[in-house]
Amino acid sequence: MLFTLPATALTSSLIIRDYNGTWQFTKGAILNQAVTLGLKYGINKSRPNNNGERAFPSGHTSTTFQSAAYIQKRYGWKFGIPAYALAGFTGYSRMNAQMHDGWDVLAGALIGIGSSYLFTTPYQKEHMDLTFSSDSESIAIGFKYKF
């Protein structure tokens, strides 16, 4: 999942020619990696299996959750739910392999989601806008679509 989920998010945006979304994904991914690696080297926590260091936060989890959050926020829950399920499985598998504990995985998930949410906007809102206004004498409904 470490490579599949980000590749799917990025490739899907490119296929539908959502270049603004591609740039949003890229900015989120860069921030995610910078924060994750900065914390890994700054904290230098030992892994639960005592086989290495830099356990906090889980990089696998932050990467997959950053991708899932991008998919969900950009394209909606229809695609976001399966993406989050795969990201959750990644976090579970990291704990099951005793490479990380729950705090490592939770921190990775929060960093991943946060880094995507800072830059990602919903896809449809860039093309459509529905407005409504009223006063005591009238009601106005507007629809705008950008080509």
Image (tube, rainbow, N blue to C red):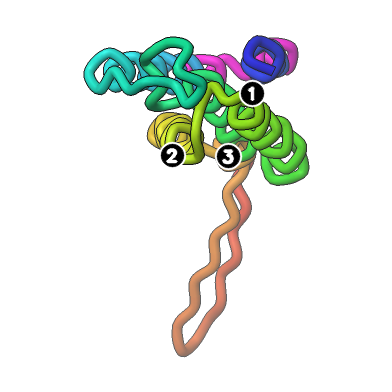
138 or 45: nearer the eye? 45
Rounded to the nearest angstrom, the CA distance separating label 1 from label 3 is 30 Å
| Residue receiving disc 2 | 103
45 left or right, relative to 81: left
Q: Nearer the viewer, residue 7 or 60?
A: 60
Q: Amino acid at mark 3?
A: Lys
Question: Which residue is more in the foreground, 140 or 84?
Answer: 84
- Distance CA(mark 2)–CA(mark 3): 24 Å
Q: Quadrant of residue 74?
A: top right
Q: Is residue 115 left or right of residue 61?
A: left
Write the residue at 22% across / 18% down. Answer: 42
Category of crowding for the residue at label 2, using alpha-carbon neighbours closer than 10 angstroms: few (below 14), some (14–19), many (at least 20): some
- The kind of residue on which mark 1 rests is Ala
Which of pointers 1 and 2 lies earlier in the amino acid sequence?
1
Q: Earlier in the sequence, mark 2 or mark 3?
A: 3
Q: Is residue 16 visible?
A: yes
Q: Where does the magenta region start and end? A: 13-23
The quarter of the picture where residue 8 lies is: top right
Magenta stretch secondary structure, dominant? helix
Residue visible at 58% across and 39% down? 73
Which of labels 1 and 2 is toward the front?
A: 1
- Residue type of the residue flagged with mark 2: Trp
Check disc 1 and report its element: helix, strand or loop: loop
Q: Which mark is residue 97?
A: 1
Residue behind mark 3: 73
Nearer the camera: disc 1 or disc 3 = 1
Q: Secondary structure at mark 3?
A: helix
In the current view of this chain or complex, which residue is farthest to the bottom? 136
Among the two numbered marks 1 and 3 on one chain, the one whose residue lies closer to the N terminus: 3
Quadrant containing the C terminus is: top right
Q: Measured from the top left, where is residue 85 in percent x and y? A: 72, 38
Marks 1 and 2, how far apart at CA: 15 Å
